[in-house]
Image (tube, rainbow, N blue to C red):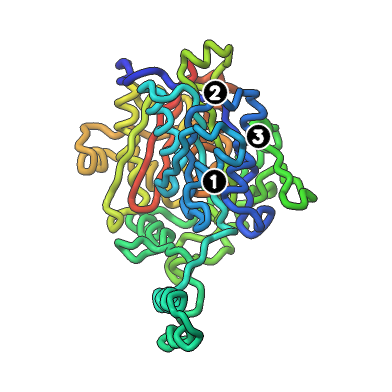
Amino acid sequence: MAAPRRVGRRVAIVAGLRTPFCKSGTAYRDLSALDLGRAVVAELLARTEIDPKSIDALTFGCVVPSLQAPNIAREVALSVNLPKSVEAYSENRACATSIQTFTSAADAIALGRSEVAIAGGAESLSDIPMSVSKPLATALLEASRAKQLPGKLRAFRGVKGKDVLPVAPALKEPTTGLLMGESAEKMAKENGISREAQDAFAHRSHSRAAKAWAEGKFDGEVMHLSVPPRYAETVAADNIVRKDSALAGYAGLKPVFDRRYGTITAGNSSPLTDGASALLLMSEERAKAEGRTPLGYLRSCAYAAVDPGWQLLQAPPFAAPVALDRAGVTLADLDLVDMHEAFAAQVLSNLQAFASQKFAEEKLGRAKPLGEVPDDKLNVNGGSIAIGHPFGATGARMITQTLRELGRRNGNLALLTVCAAGGMGAAVVLERS
């Protein structure tokens, strides 16, 4: 095994926490991403009993940010009574956002710019910011400049009925005009991923997540959240996981994106989700000085990107071999692999690429493929299809969940991968010792 290519100090993941993940429009329907981010960071600080004055940086992300608080990181830092001097900045790498906030904070620690940092992300797709059309925006601006009522009214003379409708954030890829689900359908067809295989994988995700909840595996990493402002309801668990998942039930669901020939359904896709997650990071030296036992350490990371018009969600197989090379390990050395599940078709396509000799030679320029991922090492406690996918929070959720499972198994190495909009992908290698 080659030595890892580490630059700077070793970075410890001391603790991780998340809110329960809830389907958008349900338990958190009246909460913003800031509300969720504030809740999880405040609870993380309380549980770790860390002196807020020792935090010197906070990196946080939100993929669909609020128009009122676009720099969610700074607002979270101020709202949980961290020192006003704490450096706080927001980042956005689509579905890999809290992988990005994690590696950014880790880079700062490794290079000596930070000692103790919080990284994470939040998303409220129940609170999607709405804008107005360009004609209405222009009219409103002109009206605000007019001195008299007649001038204010004239500003709206060209506004049509359709122009007053609210405009939601675009869900299509700007470069392709395709929804992510349509791109996933394209991948399923090009890679020969059957409906049956997708449904079986979705059933697997729900069954494993339900089992993990039943066995108490998530209890230490998922907080209870009393929902403001009345605090009459307390959410204690994810509300998307199907405790009674039955494979036969998936077959009856209709395709969403290609109603005639498609294979992607609501059942084999990750749902729109609200939630937040956060990590406490330190330099290894600082963790030892404080007598803390880290969950694990960052060994390596890599990012990659592909043409969105090719296979939008196929960047992880490009990032993973680079992360493994930088870690000085191979797929066979790993104890766990955790892949973000945007769609079952995407996970199965990523796994297919991992094992493909043709992909290795033609796409990666490598003599050998990474290899097949053993079923008993892959997403062992379920993934985003079952647990949910708040865009900005998923990466940090995966890090905590994977490191805790490594601890239960007395394992040492894990690979995490995340696909993201724009044809992007991330890969992280974590270690416990």
Q: Are marks 1 and 2 in contact (CB under 8 Å)?
A: no
Residue for badge 2: 54
Residue at screen point 45% across, 27% down: 414
Residue nearer the viewer, 268 or 32: 32
Residue at screen point 33% across, 38% down: 303
SS at circle 2: helix
Q: Amino acid at mark 3?
A: Glu
Q: Position of residue 91 (x, y in %)?
A: 42, 44
SS at circle 1: strand
Residue at screen point 67% across, 37% down: 223
Residue for badge 3: 43
Residue nearer the viewer, 324 or 371: 324
* Cα–Cα span, label 3 and label 2: 16 Å
Looking at the image, tell me whether mark 1 or mark 3 is earlier in sequence order. Answer: 3
Looking at the image, tell me whether mark 1 or mark 2 is earlier in sequence order. Answer: 2
* Cα–Cα span, label 1 and label 3: 14 Å
Which quarter of the figure is the N terminus placed in? Answer: top left
* Cα–Cα span, label 1 and label 2: 23 Å
Residue for badge 1: 122
Residue at screen point 52% across, 52% down: 69
How would you rate the neighbour count of disc 1 (Cα within 10 Å): few for under 14, some for 14-19, many for 20 or more? Answer: many
Q: How many marks?
A: 3
How would you rate the neighbour count of disc 2 (Cα within 10 Å): few for under 14, some for 14-19, many for 20 or more? Answer: few
Q: Amino acid at mark 1?
A: Ala
Observer-side mark, 3 or 2, equals 2
Q: Position of residue 129 (x, y in %)?
A: 52, 62
How would you rate the neighbour count of disc 3 (Cα within 10 Å): few for under 14, some for 14-19, many for 20 or more? Answer: some
Instruction: From this view, report whether residue 177 is shown above or below residue 49.
Output: below
Q: Amino acid at mark 2?
A: Ser
Q: In the drawing, does residue 10 fall left or right of residue 32? A: left
